[in-house]
Image: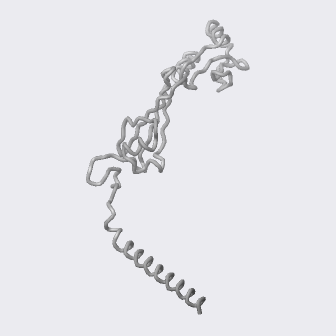
């Protein structure tokens, strides 16, 4: 008899818990959805205000500024999902160390200062009789189609010695000067 009462008590407790869980779930389902605030509008701003947020079509531009050589590296991408729906403060929290320079529904511009030198240092030299570009550490970046033998003797001597280049823009200008 004692076992039967124990089992009956357990069944009744389970039935009461199940009943209250169903009642609570039903209540939440029927009453909460209309009371939840509409946080973000489809156009990428908070509904009823002019606060811009990152949308799914927002282009994010990352600007990395290297303090030692003042080089800037810029990278663009479509807004990643973890940034979508965030306003300026939300972006600052999500991406520590970045400065939010601009935020509109179309663009997000972020800037980060990196202590040290950039990796955009090159040298122009010679490889297999052609003008070549090397990374600062001596690894070949690319071999151009410009033969070294057809160049002005002074330029040829500079290339054989190695021309140090700082930054991608300077590299492009220097290669254009060599080829012209």
In this rendering, would 159 be left or right of 32? right
Decide if residue 21 is on the left or right side of residue 36. Answer: right
Residue located farthest toward the front when viewing the structure as drawn: 2
Apparent side of residue 140 relative to residue 111 in the rendered image (left or right): right
Quick one: which residue is furthest to the left in this view?
48
Is 106 rendered above or below residue 73?
A: below
Total labels: the figure holds 0
Vertical placement of 29 versus 62: above or below?
A: below
Q: Residue at x 67, y 18 (%)?
A: 147
Location of residue 117 (image quadrant) = top right
Q: Point out residue 43 in the picture as x, y percentages from the top left corner.
A: 34, 52
Picture residue at 26% right of the left edge, 53% below the top: 48
Position of the C terminus by quadrant: top right
Q: How is the image coloured?
A: one colour
Foreground residue among 43 and 172: 43
x and y percentages locating residue 131 in the rendered image: 65, 19
- The answer to which of 166 and 90 lies nearer the viewer is 90
Q: Is residue 166 above or below residue 114?
A: above
Please state the horizontal and vertical placement of residue 62, each as a whole percent of the image.
Answer: 46, 36
Q: Quadrant of the N terminus?
A: bottom right
Name which quarter of the figure residue 25 lies in: bottom left
What residue is shown at x 34% (from left), y 56% (from top)?
39
Q: Position of residue 145 (x, y in %)?
A: 65, 23
State the residue at coordinates (68%, 24%). Answer: 139
Q: Residue extending furthest top?
A: 154
Direction bottom: furthest residue: 1
Between 82 and 122, the residue placed more toward the observer is 82
């Amino acid at each position: 008899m004692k076992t039967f009462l124990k089992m009956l008590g357990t069944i009744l407790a389970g039935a009461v818990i199940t009943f209250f869980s169903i009642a609570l779930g039903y209540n939440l389902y029927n009453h909460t959805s209309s009371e939840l605030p509409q946080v973000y509008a489809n156009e990428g701003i908070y509904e009823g205000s002019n606060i811009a947020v990152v949308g799914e079509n927002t282009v994010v531009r990352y600007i990395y500024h290297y303090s030692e050589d003042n080089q800037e590296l810029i990278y663009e991408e479509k807004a990643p999902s973890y940034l979508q729906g965030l306003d300026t403060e939300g972006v600052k929290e999500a991406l520590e160390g970045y400065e939010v320079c601009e935020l509109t529904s179309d663009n997000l511009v972020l800037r980060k200062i990196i202590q040290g030198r950039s990796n955009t240092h090159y040298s122009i030299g010679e490889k297999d009789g052609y003008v070549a570009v090397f990374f600062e550490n001596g690894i070949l970046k690319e071999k151009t189609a410009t033969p070294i033998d057809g160049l002005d003797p002074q330029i040829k001597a500079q290339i054989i010695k190695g021309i140090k280049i700082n930054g991608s823009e300077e590299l492009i200008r220097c290669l254009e000067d060599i080829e012209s």
